[in-house]
Image (cartoon, rainbow, N blue to C red):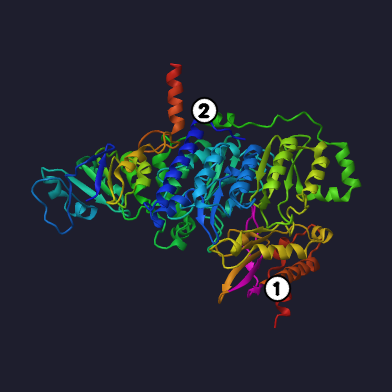
């Protein structure tokens, strides 16, 4: 089992991923592929337990836009850490579609990408098994400042401007 | 020159710490080679034929003398006493030890330098006109915009793992000295009729194995939208660029496969969401960055210096050097001086630590402590007083850095080639040296006139052979080094790709072939004003081809 980090701490994972052919359990939080979500949207929504979706790199997050409030988890898959599509997926979910639930990076999730993942809006990381957990948590602080606007905070110049406007008041 | 503030410095210092930790984890076996590779590449570190190669960023080609002396120090202490200035205005060291790289970076950070994103599948070091702020044909000084782009691209969280590398060039003059038409994104700063600064945005150009001239996606983008528009282009590329085949992964392939019109629509649709969003630039930020540039405190000088004018007539060698290596300046009484790193006894673009220190001393004396690196792999002293020019010439001659060959055949652009690079099919440097030796008669060289000769050791085209008036490409034929020759390429505002003249040649034949091409040109030119590339354009490849292959059978 990968270690799950959320809020910069190790937490236990109550979510179960359902393969496309697996039976949907009556209770307990489950997450499914985008394909299954689109096919079984009504019945999955009718469950009382929480539901989430797994997005592969080629999946368009726009498919979730109209249902975005229904999900308690969106997992974004990184089949290889060098496949950077998930970063765009994450920013779109947070910044364009207004997703506020747990967004989890899964797959080839490594210590050296933690800082970037957090900036793009991931608040949960399912670390690959072999990763050093302490080191991965320390990686949230690899840099104390950033230039660009992203999902986690506005860009440096916007914050500077806000600060000087505040100071002038 | 831009001066870091506290935050710029802290980010670079934190990078050093991060890379030291990554290197330690690799050396201890915690990081596999496959996992370390993308990390070290994003810090400019390659594992090469003989040793690691470290590429240090020289953002938009501007160096202070303090920085240049540090590059000399690193060449001495960690390399074999020299460095190689690349076609992307960076410097490469070919012999550092992997375990020394964190220390090298720590030294660099003390002079506001780094190796961030000089390789890897991310936004690379932004390049610009080496005459920025100097050239008389300048419409907008691109340096402030280049620095804004440096900050925007540094550790951009969304675009660290693109399908492939991503190169951006920006220019602000009529004459495109930054090759913007052959970059992933080319940016041409322009002014609207009302005087507002904006940018023409060009996408999908590039050299490599599929050379393509870029397409204009925006004729005029108001300046405040620059960063959000780039975000939109990069996002479309990051999401839809091909990742199944390394050779089809550059943005130019996406633009080509989708068609430029369709690609543009996708960018515009994406940008509609980002327009006026939080990434939109504001005047205060542009002014803040502008204010961090220390500009030269020029003296009030007459536009014409009598002694200089007199010497031009009296001393032909001086006149010849001035005609090739000295360039007009926006400021009266000043000029910019090219320091030729070609034909000084070293491979094209190489400089010894002694050269670097000597040029730094000269820049302190003659050029407000500022040096530029050109994409043609030379150095420039950008702000020299005309009345001191002869004195500077004397100093450069003594250093063998005054070869009057800027724009001429021996000002060869060459990649490091098979002597150093593990990708190369063939050597580049010995070919360049053989051609330089063949054309070492300065009178003849000047008579031939402007001629760009570019050499790449393989299809990756680091020597920009496609846009050379004469381009030479190293190819592998059954394990042997052969050279394919093209003519008619050109860089600049009317950039074009050269045409291959026919079957390739053995290395020993190359200088003869170049000489034959030059003979055909000289025989056909209508006047001295008509350059080699103009004759190729007028007559086509045929007469050149006939002459070169006539005796081949």
Q: Judge left or right: residue A42 versus residue B497.
A: left
Quadrant of res B372: top right
Looking at the image, the residue that sits furthest to the left is A26
**Quadrant housing the N terminus of chain B:** top right
> Which subunit holds the residue at mark 2?
B
User: Mark 1 packing: few (<14 Cα in 10 Å), some, or many (20+)?
Assistant: few
Q: Which residues are magenta?
A: B480-506
User: At which x and y percent is residue B520?
Assistant: 77, 69
Say which element carries label 2: helix
**Quadrant housing the C terminus of chain B:** bottom right
The front one of B365 and B306 is B365
Mark 1 — residue? B509
Looking at the image, the residue that sits furthest to the right is B314
Up-down relation of residue B534 to residue B101 (above or below)? below
Instruction: Tell me what residue is drawn at x 64 percent, y 55 percent.
Output: B491
User: At which x and y percent is residue A77?
Assistant: 29, 51
Q: Is residue B135 visible?
A: no
Q: Which mark is residue B284?
A: 2
């Amino acid at each position: 089992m990968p270690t799950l980090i959320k809020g910069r701490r190790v937490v236990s994972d109550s979510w179960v991923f359902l393969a496309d052919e697996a039976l949907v359990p009556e209770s307990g939080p489950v997450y499914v592929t985008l394909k299954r979500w689109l096919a079984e949207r009504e019945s999955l929504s009718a469950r009382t337990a929480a539901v989430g979706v797994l997005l592969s790199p080629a999946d368009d997050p726009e498919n979730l836009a109209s249902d975005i409030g229904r999900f308690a988890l969106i997992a974004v898959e990184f089949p290889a850490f060098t496949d950077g599509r998930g970063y765009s997926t994450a920013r779109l979910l947070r910044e364009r579609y207004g997703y506020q639930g747990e967004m989890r990076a899964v797959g080839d999730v490594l210590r050296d990408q933690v800082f970037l993942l957090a900036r793009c809006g991931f608040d949960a990381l399912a670390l690959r098994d072999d990763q050093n957990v302490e080191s991965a948590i320390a990686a949230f602080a690899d840099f104390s400042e950033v230039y660009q606007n992203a999902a986690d905070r506005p860009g440096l110049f916007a914050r500077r401007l806000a600060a000087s406007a505040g100071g002038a008041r | 020159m831009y001066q870091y503030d506290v935050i710029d410095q802290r980010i670079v210092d934190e990078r050093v710490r991060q890379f030291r930790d990554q290197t330690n984890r690799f050396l201890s076996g915690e990081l596999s080679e496959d996992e370390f590779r993308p990390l070290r590449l994003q810090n400019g570190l390659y594992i090469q034929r003989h040793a690691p190669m470290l590429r240090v960023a020289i953002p938009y080609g501007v160096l202070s003398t303090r920085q240049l002396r540090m590059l000399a120090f690193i060449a001495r202490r960690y390399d074999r006493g020299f460095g190689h200035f690349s076609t992307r205005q960076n410097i490469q060291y070919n012999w550092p030890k992997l375990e020394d790289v964190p220390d090298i970076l720590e030294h660099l950070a003390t002079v506001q330098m780094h190796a961030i994103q000089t390789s890897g599948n991310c936004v690379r070091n932004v390049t610009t006109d080496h005459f920025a702020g100097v050239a008389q044909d300048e419409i907008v000084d691109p340096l402030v915009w280049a620095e804004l782009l440096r900050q925007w691209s540094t550790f951009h969280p969304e675009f660290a793992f693109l399908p492939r590398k991503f190169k951006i060039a920006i220019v602000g003059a009529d004459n495109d000295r930054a090759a913007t038409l052959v970059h992933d994104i080319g940016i041409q700063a322009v002014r609207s009729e009302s005087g507002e600064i904006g940018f023409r945005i060009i996408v999908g150009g590039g050299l490599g194995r599929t050379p393509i001239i870029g397409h204009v996606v925006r004729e005029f983008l108001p300046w405040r939208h620059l960063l959000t528009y780039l975000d939109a282009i990069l996002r479309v590329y990051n999401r839809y660029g091909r990742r199944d085949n390394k050779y089809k992964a550059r943005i130019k392939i996406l633009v080509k496969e989708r068609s430029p019109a369709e690609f543009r629509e996708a960018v515009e649709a994406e940008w509609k969401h980002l327009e006026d969003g939080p990434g939109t630039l504001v005047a205060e930020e542009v002014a803040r960055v502008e204010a961090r540039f220390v500009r030269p405190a020029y003296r009030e000088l007459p536009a014409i210096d009598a002694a200089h004018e007199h010497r031009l007539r009296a001393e032909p060698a001086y006149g010849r050097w001035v005609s090739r290596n000295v360039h007009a300046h926006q400021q009266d009484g000043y000029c910019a001086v090219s320091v030729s790193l070609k034909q000084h006894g070293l491979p094209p673009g190489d400089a010894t630590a002694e050269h670097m220190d000597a040029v730094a001393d000269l820049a302190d004396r003659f050029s407000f402590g500022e040096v530029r690196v050109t994409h043609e792999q030379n150095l420039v002293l950008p702000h020299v007083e005309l009345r001191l020019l002869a004195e500077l010439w004397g100093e450069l001659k003594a250093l063998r850095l005054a070869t009057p060959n800027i724009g001429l055949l021996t000002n060869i652009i060459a990649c490091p080639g098979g002597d150093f690079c593990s990708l190369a099919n063939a050597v580049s440097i010995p070919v360049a040296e053989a051609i330089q030796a063949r054309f070492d008669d300065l009178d003849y060289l000047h008579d031939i006139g402007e001629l760009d000769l570019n050499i790449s050791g393989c299809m990756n085209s680091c020597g920009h052979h496609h846009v050379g008036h004469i381009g030479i490409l190293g190819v592998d034929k059954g394990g042997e080094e052969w050279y394919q020759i093209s003519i008619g390429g050109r860089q600049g505002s009317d950039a074009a790709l050269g045409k291959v003249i026919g079957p390739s040649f053995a290395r020993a034949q190359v200088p003869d072939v170049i000489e034959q091409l030059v003979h055909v040109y000289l025989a056909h030119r209508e006047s001295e004003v008509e350059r080699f590339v103009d004759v190729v354009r007028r007559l086509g490849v045929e007469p050149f081809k006939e002459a070169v292959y006539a005796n081949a059978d």
